Amino acid sequence: MIVTTTKGEMDDSLLEKREGTVDNENELTTWVEYWLDSELVHRSVHVTLKKVPTFAGGDTASF
Amino acid sequence: MANTQSMATSFLGELMLAQHQLGASTIVSRGSLTSPTVDTLKAALFLASATINAATTAYSTTGEVTGTGYTAGGVTITNATAPTSTNSSATAGVGYWTPSASFVYTTVTLSTAFDCVLVYNSTQSNKAISVHTFGSQTITAGTFTLTMPSNTTTTALLRLATT
């Protein structure tokens, strides 16, 4: 697979792939990194918002 | 300084003034009654060191991310889903809305940590709508995708509730 990197397009067989996930009540985040020797040349992140706090409580005046 | 997830307080008042059109425009919207306009909503990313919160009234470049492939102002939000509302009791209900597609920043390098997206109305003088935070990130020659929550009364991106 071809990967876009800071060095240009590269075949992933030449790179070290690292992946990770963060899963909590607010978000599910996955990230993938490609390293060339000890240099980070690609990092992409996908954040899925799971729950957004209720922003407002409303009320009406009574008479 | 830090970013805080919230709805822009100014947005609440602006709703009463019909200054935002989050769904397809209707005949009762402001502007031309024969050719009503549709507002363009955008999503801009902000550094973890910025201060974006309920007091933010409009988008500005202060604290916004910069980097290769990222255009100031962020991306345009795809919005094919109109806001809707439902009653939960005789005295309470909720109005809610979620954009119909993810926010995608393609092939960017954002080297300084960011943790916030500001949703704003670029048609209406960049008026702020809401602030959403997530774990701090950087991107290197890659893509940042922010997928929306489910469009329900309890998880939608924007929810206005009475109790």
Image (tube, grey):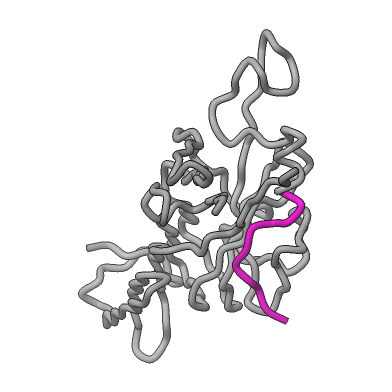
Nearer the observer, B42 or B163:
B163
Nearer the observer, B105 or B13:
B13
Q: Is residue B94 magenta?
A: no
In this picture, residue A14 sits left or right of residue B85: left
- x then y, percent, for residue B46: 64, 67
Residue B160 visible to the viewer? yes
Nearer the observer, B127 or B161:
B161
Residue B44 visible to the viewer? no
- x then y, percent, for residue B148: 42, 54
Nearer the observer, B137 or B151:
B151
Pick out the residue farthest to the bottom.
A38
- x then y, percent, for residue B66: 66, 66
> Which residue appears at 61% of the width and 42% of the height?
B41
- Chain part drawn in magenta: B1-11
In this picture, residue B4 sits left or right of residue B156: right
- x then y, percent, for residue A36: 35, 83
Q: Quadrant of the N terminus of chain B?
A: bottom right
Q: Is B129 situated above or below B67?
A: above
> Which residue appears at 48% of the width and 36% of the height?
B84
Q: Which quadrant of the figure has residue A32?
A: bottom left
Q: Is residue B3 magenta?
A: yes
Q: Which quadrant of the figure has residue B39?
A: top right
Q: Quadrant of the C terminus of chain B?
A: bottom right
Q: Is B38 situated above or below B55?
A: above
Pick out the residue farthest to the front.
A63
| Numbered disc total | 0
> Which residue appears at 73% of the width and 23% of the height?
B30
> Which residue appears at 61% of the width and 57% of the height?
A56
Q: Is B63 situated above or below B107?
A: below
